[in-house]
């Protein structure tokens, strides 16, 4: 068997992820398929590339050598492809996909400043899975993605990622008339008897994350309503339901409160096709997106206190 680029990307993904299961998610393949591919590669090179046990996958001496050469070859290929692809993307406005963020208008301001052609397109999605699929299918050139703790992103090695915001919390929205609305923060266990609106984009693991979070607090959430992203505000205002929300949300008809001890957090990422944008463009874009998010957080009456008291969420700030 002759080695192909997909084989090199696969062994690099296994080394980076530390296990075949996590690497399979990143590559968008099944674990059995990746295991078979690795076996064929090891047969082709004449030795084991990884030691595999319950702790994961660790490169052997032969594996270390193969990985060094694979990374060099892939870096050279990416440099070659980036020069060609950057010319192609530069000939048309980039297609951007974004999570449904409370600071979306500021995000668009930054994007329009970076890509001033006037024909920029932005597709907003609540599902992390949909955002990843748009990138994988080349229907978007870059995406702004919110990743919850312990959530795996189904992105292949061809997609690069960079952190915009290393940590953000999840808040809860409830009626202003709710007895708990008078508290500056709410303990999750005090919401055990509430009726919940299902998180938007539940197919991406957000519903499972809500259930896991509540399970740790000693209860199972009662999911009563399924509404589109951005909907359900009237249900909350009338006291029929509560839901998890972006910490920067500020609907006048609802009370937005932090959850005590931050039982759920995430991070904000920029993801893009590795060949599509120069490094300096990505670096500047990430910095400006972070600054836009920071401005929104600092001006938000519901988010400002949390933001100011958690410097680890914005380590670039002096």
Image: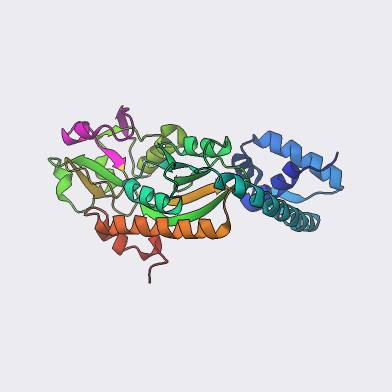
Residue 183: image location, x then y, percent: 17, 51
Whether residue 201 sits left or right of residue 240 in the image: it is right
Please report the residue visible at 52 percent of the width from the left and 54 percent of the height from the top: 162
The stretch of residues the image draws in magenta is: 221-244
Judge whether 162 appears above or below 196 on screen: below
Q: Quadrant of residue 22?
A: top right
Q: Quadrant of the C terminus?
A: bottom left
Please report the residue visible at 46 percent of the width from the left and 39 percent of the height from the top: 128
Q: How many marks?
A: 0
Residue 40: image location, x then y, percent: 80, 39
**What's the image's color scheme?**
rainbow
Please report the residue visible at 62 percent of the width from the left and 50 percent of the height from the top: 17
Residue 283: image location, x then y, percent: 51, 59
Residue 213 shows up from this direction: yes
Whether residue 227 sits left or right of residue 7 in the image: it is left
Whether residue 165 sits left or right of residue 194 in the image: it is right
Please state which of residues 128 and 31 is positioned toward the viewer in this rendering.
Answer: 128
Residue 123: image location, x then y, percent: 42, 37
Please state which of residues 317 and 235 is positioned toward the viewer in this rendering.
Answer: 317
Q: Quadrant of the N terminus?
A: top right
Please state which of residues 260 and 203 is positioned toward the viewer in this rendering.
Answer: 203
The stretch drawn in magenta includes residue 252 = no
**Which residue in the rendered view is the most extreme toward the bottom?**
318
Judge whether 318 appears above or below 169 on screen: below
Residue 57 shows up from this direction: no
Judge whether 208 appears above or below 260 on screen: above
């Amino acid at each position: 068997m002759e080695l192909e680029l997909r084989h090199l990307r696969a062994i690099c993904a296994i080394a980076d992820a530390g296990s075949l299961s996590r690497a399979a998610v990143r590559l968008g393949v099944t674990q059995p398929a990746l295991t078979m591919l690795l076996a064929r590669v090891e047969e082709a090179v004449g030795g084991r590339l990884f030691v595999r046990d319950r702790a994961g996958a660790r490169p052997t001496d032969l594996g270390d050598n193969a990985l060094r050469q694979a990374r060099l070859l892939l870096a050279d290929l990416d440099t070659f492809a980036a020069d060609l692809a950057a010319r192609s993307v530069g000939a048309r406005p980039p297609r951007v996909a974004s999570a449904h963020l409370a600071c979306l208008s500021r995000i668009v301001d930054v994007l329009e400043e970076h890509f001033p052609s006037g024909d920029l397109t932005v597709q907003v999605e609540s599902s992390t899975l949909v955002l990843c699929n748009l990138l994988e299918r080349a229907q978007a050139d870059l995406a702004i993605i919110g990743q919850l703790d312990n959530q795996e992103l189904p992105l292949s090695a061809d997609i690069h990622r960079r952190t915009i915001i290393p940590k953000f919390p999840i808040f809860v929205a409830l009626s202003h008339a709710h007895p708990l609305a008078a508290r500056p923060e709410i303990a999750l266990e005090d919401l055990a008897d509430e009726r919940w609106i299902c998180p938007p984009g539940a197919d991406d693991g957000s519903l499972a994350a809500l259930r896991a979070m509540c399970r740790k607090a000693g209860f199972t959430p009662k999911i009563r309503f399924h509404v589109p992203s951005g909907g359900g505000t009237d249900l909350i205002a009338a006291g029929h339901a509560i839901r998890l929300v972006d910490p920067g949300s500020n609907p006048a008809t609802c009370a937005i409160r932090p959850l005590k001890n931050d039982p759920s957090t995430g991070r904000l990422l920029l993801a893009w096709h590795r060949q599509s944008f120069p490094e300096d463009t990505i670096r500047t874009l990430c910095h400006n997106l972070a600054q836009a998010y920071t401005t929104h957080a600092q001006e938000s009456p519901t988010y400002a206190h949390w933001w100011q008291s958690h410097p680890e969420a914005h380590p670039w700030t002096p």
